[in-house]
Amino acid sequence: MSKSILIIAGETSGDTHGVALVRALKEMYPDMHIAGIGGNKMKNAGMELLYHVRDMSFMGFVEVVKHLPFIFKVRDTLETWVDEISPDAVVLIDYPGFNLRFAKLMKNRELPVYYYISPQVWAWGKGRLKKMKHLVDKMFVIFPFEEELYRKHDVRVEFVGHPLVEEVEEVAPRKEFYEQRGFDQDIKTIGLFPGSRMQEVERHLDAMLGAVKRIREQSKEPLQCWLAVAPDLDKSAFGDWTDELEVQLVQNATYEVMSHSDIAITSSGSATLEIAYFGTPMIIIYKMSNLTWWLGNLLVDMPYIGLANIVAEKKVVPELLQNDANPGKIADTALKYLQDEHYYSSVKNSLSMIRNKLGEPGAGRRVAQSIADEIYESE
C-alpha cells in the first residue's frame, strides 16, 4: 500500500528548500502521495498543492492578526485532509507561527511529526524547547549549533547540513550572466533583494532605490544595478518603482544576482545567508510595523537579526533596522564598501568562513531517507 505525507512550507524559502525533499521521496517511492502547502518548485517535483505559499505570505504580528480568518480556514482545510487521508507522516518546514500550532493538532491525532529547518528557538521562545520534545518526533536542523541545543533538551535531532549548499551548484558563470543582461563586467554592480513577499517589497524598496540614487550621485565611478524579483511575485508590479531608474529586474536567477553583484542590499531573512555563501559583502535592512518592532524587541534576545551574522557569531556585515533603514544611511554604508578596499576585503574574508559551517550537499535527501526509514519500518 502506498504511503502519504503532508508537508507544510508556508514561505518561498520553504519551497526552495523543500523541493529536494519532495524530489528525493518521489525518486525513492514514486507512488507516494505528497500534498500540502508549497510553491511552484515543490509542485513541479510532484507535490499536490492544497495551498500555495503566496497565499500564506504574512509578515509581522499585526498582519497575521488581520488574516486570522483565512489562517483558520487553511488550518481547518488541512485538518479535514488529514482526517480523510490519514497520512503516514507530517513534515513541517520552518514557518513556526503556523507550524508549531499545527504540530500540536497532529500529535493529538498521534501522527508522526517531523520538523525540517528549525524555528529560531535560539532567538525567541527558548522556553518552548521543552515543549518541542512533545510536539515533534524528530528535528532536522541545518546549523551545527542547533543540534547541540536540541540535544541538551532531549529532543531527537539530526544535523543534515544546509540545503543551500546543494541549491547553488547550477549558478551561471559571471561572464555569461553579465553578457545576457547587457551589463559590463568592469563596472561595479549593486544587487537589491527587497524580500520574497510583496509586503516586504513595499516596506523596503523605496529606501533601497533612494539609496541607489544617492550612491550614484556620490560615487566617483559608474554603477550598475539589478533587482532580484522573487519567483512568486509579479514582475510587472515593480515598474512603478523602477521605471525612472536604471535598475534591471531579474527573475528566476536570484543566486546569479547574489553571486555576481559586487555589493548587495538585502532585507533580513534567508537571503542574508545565501548572499554570505557567495561571499558578497552586503547591507542588511529590515522594516516592520511599529507594533511588530516593539514586540520583537520585547521577545527576541539576539544581538543580530541577519542569519549571516548569527551563523558567524559576530557582526560581519552591517544591519540597518527600522528607522535606520533609510536612503541616507544605506547609501553611506554602501559607499564605504565601494571606497574602502581594506574594509571590503575584510568583510569578504569573514564571509568565506560562514560557508564552512553549512555542511555537505544532500540535506533534502538525508531528511527524506530518515523519514522513509521510520515510516516504512513501522509497517
Image: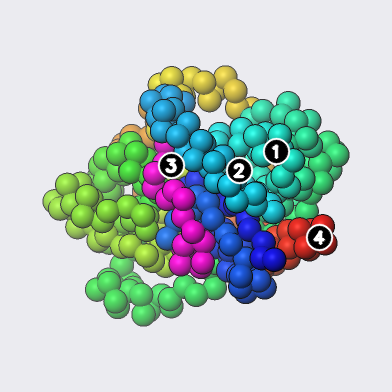
Mark 2 vs mark 1: in front: 2
Quadrant of the drawing holding the C terminus:
bottom right
Looking at the image, residue 149 lies above or below residue 191: above
Left or right: residue 181 versus residue 105 is: left
The residue carrying mark 4 is: 379
Which residue sits at x=38%, y=25%?
66
- Choose the circle earlier in sequence order: 2 or 4: 2
The residue carrying mark 1 is: 109
Left or right: residue 126 versus residue 238 is: right
Which residue sits at x=37%, y=58%?
231
Left or right: residue 340 versus residue 198 is: right
For label 2, the crowd category at 10 Å Cα-Cα, with few meaning under 14, some 14 to 19 and many 20 or more, is few
Q: Position of residue 324 (x, y in %)?
A: 40, 31
Labels 2 and 1 touching (C-beta < 8 A): yes
Labels 4 and 3 touching (C-beta < 8 A): no
In 3D space, how far apart are the residues under numbered discs 4 and 3 (Cα atoms)? 35 Å
User: What amino acid type is highlighted by mark number 2?
Assistant: Asp
Which residue sits at x=43%, y=24%?
65
For label 3, the crowd category at 10 Å Cα-Cα, with few meaning under 14, some 14 to 19 and many 20 or more, is many
Residue 163 appears anywhere in the view: no
User: What amino acid type is highlighted by mark number 4?
Assistant: Glu
Hey, which residue is sitting farthest left in the picture?
Answer: 244
Mark 1 vs mark 3: in front: 1
- Choose the circle earlier in sequence order: 3 or 2: 3
Q: In the image, which residues are magenta?
A: 41-59
User: What amino acid type is highlighted by mark number 1?
Assistant: Arg
Looking at the image, residue 312 lies above or below residue 286: below
The residue carrying mark 2 is: 83
Does the magenta segment cover residue 253?
A: no
Q: Which mark identifies residue 56?
A: 3
Residue at disc 2, secondary structure: helix
- Choose the circle earlier in sequence order: 1 or 3: 3
